[in-house]
Amino acid sequence: MKRRKIFRILDRYFGIPIVLLLRLFNFNFSKNLPKETKKIIFVKFAAVGDIVLLIPTLKLLKKKFPDAEIDFLCTNINSGIIKTIPFLDNVIVCKVYDFIKNPFYFLRFVKMLRKKQYDLLIDAEQWSRIDAIISFFIRKKFSVGFRTKNQFRHYNYSVSVNHSRFKHESENFIELLNPLGLKAKEEDKVPEFYLTAEDVEFAENYWEENDLSKYEIICFQPSCGTGSFAREWKEENYSSLGRKILEYDPEIRFFLTGTKSDFDKCQRIVYGIGKNAENLAGKFSMGKDLAIIRKSDLLICSNTGILHMAAAIGAKTIGLHGPNNPEQWGAYSGNAEVILSDIFCSPCLYLGHEYRCNAPVCMPRIKVEDVYLKVRDILEKD
């Protein structure tokens, strides 16, 4: 978390002057699309949820240029999910935090990128300047990126596209294709996620081996990842919710999902529920977790990557939103329910990190009773 904060400070106070300085040396970028588009590079350094919302854009891009080779420049934060996207030819992973420790790594990385020549570059980053700086050094004939208010990162693209806080982020990403003459239909905007046949088979076998077909299954994912505690609902709330649901139906089963680092947190919630709860955090791969979630009746979590992935594979979800605006960052699905904090300042986030208070006050305002009533409503409809 400390490393991320340092990076954001450096990115803003050094990144903005560097972007402006590079603009002085950028005389030759074209304002016109090349006649042929054979090589494309997409740039996005974070995060997992954003990548899910970006998939419709990548699918449309591949449809527009079916014969083009598409590379994706990313970081190790989101490379795992990017490698599952079938429209990409190459994934290039950049260790951004190593730039701070070793400036020579930046020079070597840029030198490697300079060996390639692209017809089209699309930078899908909304706020950070490091993506824009690296994009400047990539050899390309035409480039597109976001013009985001007060971020001062858009000066070196052939065309910049206004980023809007009043649109869903999936639609913002699709707007990047407008300069290419691409317009999306409503059905084109729905995110997709791709489970492997192995993961689907694993979930089927897991249900059979544990005799789960006769039970309703609810998944909780309490963690939102490193540095995102302000978006998380308290552990005791998940425990109380589980106990309350068991009063309604003592046969319901609960799965707690997450990464290995979430195991202890999930285990405390399992103890708090008391029975019918199993801790799956860190036991399986992300794909297997998602296959389990898809076979379950419901996922309950805050606004995090797993919410978008679950919605994209058709799972029913309840998203708990405090600082995040569900109109911009909510699960893009007809199976997605939203519970928003009732505090006057919620939601406060536009770009996903500019929290307006040191101590989170919005998520505690989401009441267990309200989530419980939403769960009952979903189960009774089913």
Image: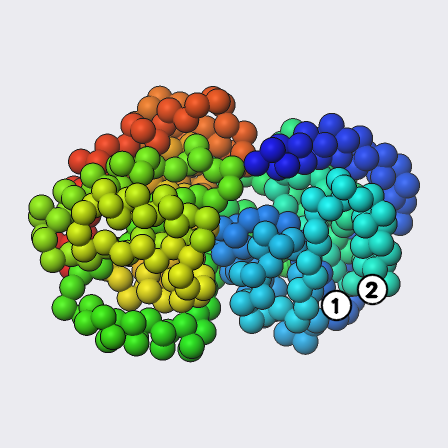
**Considering the numbered disc 2 on the image, is that residue within a helix, a strand or a loop?**
loop
Q: Amino acid at mark 1?
A: Lys
Image check: 81 left or right of 237? Answer: right
Residue at image point 27% right, 36% down: 236
Q: Toward the viewer: 348 or 27?
A: 348
Which corner quadrant holds the N terminus? top right
Residue 74, image x, y percentages: 65, 55
Q: Is residue 220 above or below residue 10?
A: below
Q: How many C-alpha atoms fall within 10 Å of the one at disc 2: few (<14), some, or many (≥20)?
A: few
Name the front one of labels 2 and 1. 2
Q: Front-most of 73 and 54? A: 73
Quadrant (top left/top right/bottom left/bottom right) for the C terminus? bottom left
Snapshot quadrant of residue 302: top left
Residue 98 position, x and y percent, is 73, 46
The residue singled out by tag 1 in the image is: 39
Disc 2 designates what residue? 116
Instruction: Please give left or right for residue 133 compared with residue 63 in the image.
Output: right
